[in-house]
Image (tube, rainbow, N blue to C red):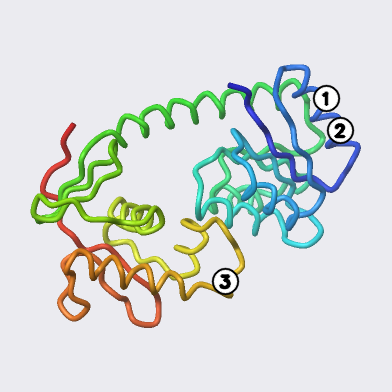
């Protein structure tokens, strides 16, 4: 499978150098010169790795890292002229996996990219194995391999988005998510004009699972913030 790499860099000369080296190594490269354009490209296609500069037109590299990390574990390498420890620490703290300062060795950068992609592929392989297992909460069983949810042994008819939303919450128990975060994660859009759809889907899930809003077993409303999953996991089986 061909590895695609997204470069978000406003310096055309630097971007071209990186692109040439990567394409010689067999990678497919997409280059965007602004933060907003880079984020759109990220949401439109799957990538094996993201290279991002910090000083960008539109959204900064910091903002790009934060937004990508809210929905994806794809490796992010910051390539920046900023050399202060604070910039490096902040970048790594908000989700970057590596930090390379300009000027840099293209060969070293390619080696770092290979290493990050290799780690990511191992992570994805383990995640795939995990996703074949069943999650059991009270009287609800999630068969991830068959994308089936049962309540008291009876299959529940979930739409694709209801399933994705419920399993995402179930895999992150106790973590509070805003409607905006859930909308971005499940619908892969950053336009929040229609985030009411999250509320509607939560309502439908609760109805199908007979999960009362007042005394919930699975999804709890965190007033003024969003939602969190409170179901107790009884078993994790293969």
Q: Position of residue 92 (x, y in %)?
A: 56, 47
At x 28% / y 33%, what residue is drawn?
132
Residue at the far right in the pictured view: 13
Where does label 2 land, which residue?
16
Q: Viewer-nearest of labels 3 and 2?
A: 3
Is residue 20 positioned above or below 36 on the image?
A: above
Q: State the CA–CA distance, disc 2 to disc 1.
A: 6 Å
Residue under the image location 27 percent in, 55 percent down: 157
Q: Nearer the viewer, residue 96 or 149?
A: 149
Q: Which residue is mark 1?
A: 20
Disc 2 secondary structure class: helix
Badge 1: residue crowd in 10 Å (few <14, some 14–19, many ≥20): few
Which quarter of the picture shows residue 108?
A: top right
- Secondary structure under tag 1 reads helix
- Is tag 3's residue or tag 2's residue first in the polypeptide sequence? 2
Q: Is residue 92 left or right of residue 159?
A: right
**Image marks 2 and 1: residues in contact by CB distance under 8 Å:** yes
Report x, y in % for residue 93.
53, 51
Looking at the rendered image, the quarter that the N terminus falls into is top right
Q: CA distance from mark 1 to mark 3?
A: 37 Å
State the quadrant of the C terminus: top left
Compared with 220, 7 (above or below) is above
Which of marks 3 and 1 precedes in the sequence?
A: 1
Q: Nearer the viewer, residue 154 or 116?
A: 154
Q: What residue is shown at x 72% (from left), y 50% (from top)?
A: 38
Tell me the quarter of the picture where residue 100 sits: top right
Q: Label 3 belongs to which residue? A: 192
Q: Is the residue 178 above or below the residue 143 in the image?
A: below
Between the C-alphas of marks 3 and 2, the distance is 34 Å
Residue pictured at 23% horizontal, 70% vertical: 207
Mark 3 Cα shell of 10 Å, populated few (<14), some (14-19), many (≥20):
few
């Amino acid at each position: 499978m061909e590895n695609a790499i997204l470069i978000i860099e406003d310096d055309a000369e630097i971007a071209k150098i990186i692109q040439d080296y990567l394409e010689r190594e067999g990678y497919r490269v997409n280059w965007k010169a602004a933060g907003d354009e880079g984020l759109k490209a990220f949401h439109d296609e799957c990538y094996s790795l993201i290279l991002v500069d910090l000083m960008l037109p539109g959204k900064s590299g910091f903002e790009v890292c934060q937004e990508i990390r809210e929905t994806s574990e794809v490796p992010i390498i910051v390539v920046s002229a900023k050399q202060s420890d604070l910039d490096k620490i902040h970048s790594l703290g908000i989700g970057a996996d590596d930090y390379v300062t300009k000027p840099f060795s293209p060969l070293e950068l390619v080696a770092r990219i290979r290493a990050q992609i290799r780690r990511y592929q191992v992570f994805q392989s383990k995640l795939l194995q995990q996703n074949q297992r069943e999650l059991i909460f009270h009287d609800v069983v999630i068969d991830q391999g068959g994308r089936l949810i049962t309540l008291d042994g009876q299959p529940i008819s979930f739409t694709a988005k209801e399933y994705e939303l419920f399993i995402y919450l179930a895999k992150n128990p106790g973590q509070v998510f805003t409607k905006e975060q859930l909308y971005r994660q499940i619908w892969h859009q950053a336009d929040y004009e229609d985030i009411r759809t999250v509320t509607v889907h939560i309502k439908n899930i609760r109805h199908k699972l007979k999960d009362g809003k007042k005394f919930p077993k699975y999804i709890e409303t965190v007033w003024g913030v969003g939602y969190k999953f409170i179901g107790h996991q009884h078993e994790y089986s293969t």
